[in-house]
Amino acid sequence: MWRALEVILFSTTEPVSSYQIARLLEEGGWLQGGGKITPGQVEKYIEQLIREWGDGNRPLTVLKIAGGYQMATRPEWSQLVAKLQEDKRSHRLSRAALETLAIVAYKQPVIRPDIDAIRGVNSDSALKTLMEKNLVAISGRDEGPGRPLLYRTTPYFLKYFGLNSLQDLPDPTELATLMGISVDTNRETQ
Amino acid sequence: MGYSVRIEAFEGPLDLLIYLIRKNEMDIYDIPVAQVTQQYLDYLEVLKLLDLEVAGDFLVMAATLMQIKARMLLPVPAVEEEEEDPRLELVRQLEEYQLFRQAAEDLAGREEQYTHYYLRESGPGPVQLPDMEEMVVDVSLFDLLSAYKQALDRIKEEGRYRVTGPEVKLTDQIEYLRGLLQKEERISLMEALAKLDNRLAMVVTLVAVLELARLAEVGLEQPDLYGDIWLTRRSPTIAFSKGIS
């Protein structure tokens, strides 16, 4: 079972959920006595795998992102891997892009005028960049006048920032205390 | 001057304002508007002198500041009208902007951190993964009812059982479960039921469990035969019920 689990984690090109791993193991007959396994148990095994690899100084680990698991090289090895791949990662996001992204992440689905209102500037080019990088996507139109476009973050956004789900974003109230400001969480919306 | 330069010194008017407020160690909740407005306009002047582009947004803010300053200079009306502090909207805007600036910094940190992990981007062929749709409930109705009975027995044993209780609403119990799942990704159904003390609450909570399963917000599993049932949090949709609305 352990070998099969490693192979699944190695082969997948997208994060694979514990449920999917459980099904794969069951269907392939990789469990002793043709037994069953629950997603919860899969998660425990993966945690153990990560620990063992850590203890054994293996250069690999498993990340829990976008609702699933995927094997990854440890950060200490990033230089070597970057050399092997034509590293497209040298371009970090600009502050404008990050601010816009943060707003979309917390307020989605959101229309551009609302983003502009918070930033105090026009967010057109920032949104364009974010869509080009597949971090943000259009997800329909708002009901109101003009039927403006609504924006949401993409599953790739979760992968890019190592988030398992949107719930893993810091709590807005926590951020507020970090900055020593008060936030009215019961603000009425029009 | 024969050349013009573009400097991305400040992201926007709010950015500049925050800089001025901090630099002068002003209290954001009691901004000396006249002073800030003057410094703000001075900055715009410098930009013009250096032949830099001043974006329209900066000018809009300049106008807003002057408007606030004017309103604050007006004499208080004789009639006892509750005049709202003209700075309020600006303060709210600054607060909200700061919040997202902090969130953006947080994201930047994560970006830096996760950029060092390399994942497989492509393989020999597309990966065939099992469907996620049937994933939600791995437990039979019989098991759920057994759990209910066990919890009922337990609270009777502990002497906490009440024959009647206050009215229990389904929406409340759904929120109750969501609250528990917010803190811990995986919770025991037994524990959740045992926290209650009467039949009605427990039954409604069971229905709440089924409702959450239907919404695919929760997965149910029973690892041990006839053992406890575990609820696992899933997040198919964004649910920010707290925080900025």
Image: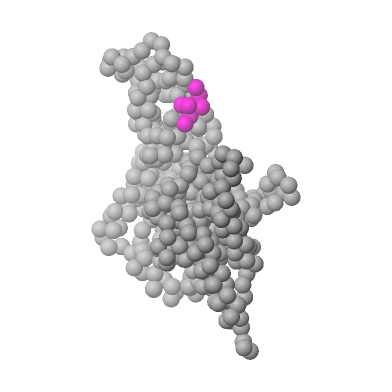
Considering every residue shown, the one lying at the far bottom of the view is B2
Magenta segment's dominant SS is helix
Tell me, yes or no, if residue A10 can be seen here: no
Q: Position of residue B133 (x, y in %)?
A: 55, 39
Q: Nearer the viewer, residue A59 or A25?
A: A59
Q: Position of residue A183 (x, y in %)?
A: 46, 47
Q: Is residue B241 above or below residue B142?
A: below
Which residue does the image show at 45% across and 52% down from the upper left?
A: B29
Q: Position of residue A103 (x, y in %)?
A: 54, 54
Q: Count every numbered label the image shows and give the total.
A: 0
Which residue does the image show at 62% across and 66% down from the upper left?
A: B59
Tell me, yes or no, if residue A33 can be seen here: yes
Drawn side of residue B72 relative to residue A140, left or right: left
Q: Position of residue A102 (x, y in %)?
A: 51, 56
Which residue does the image show at 62% across and 75% down from the upper left?
A: B53
State the quadrant of the C terminus of chain A: top right
Considering every residue shown, the one lying at the far front of the view is B78
Q: Is residue B21 above or below residue B240?
A: below
Q: Nearer the viewer, residue B86 or B195?
A: B86
Coloring basis for residues: one colour
Considering every residue shown, the one lying at the far left of the view is A55
Residue A96 appears in which quarter of the rendering? bottom right
Residue B55 appears in which quarter of the rendering? bottom right
Q: Does residue B174 belong to the magenta stretch?
A: yes
Which residue does the image show at 48% across and 59% down from the upper left?
A: B32
Considering every residue shown, the one lying at the far top of the view is B163
Q: Is residue A57 above or below residue B237?
A: below
Q: Nearer the viewer, residue B192 or A148?
A: A148
Drawn side of residue A122 relative to residue A5, left or right: right
Q: Which residues are magenta?
A: B169-175
Q: Does residue A106 belong to the magenta stretch?
A: no
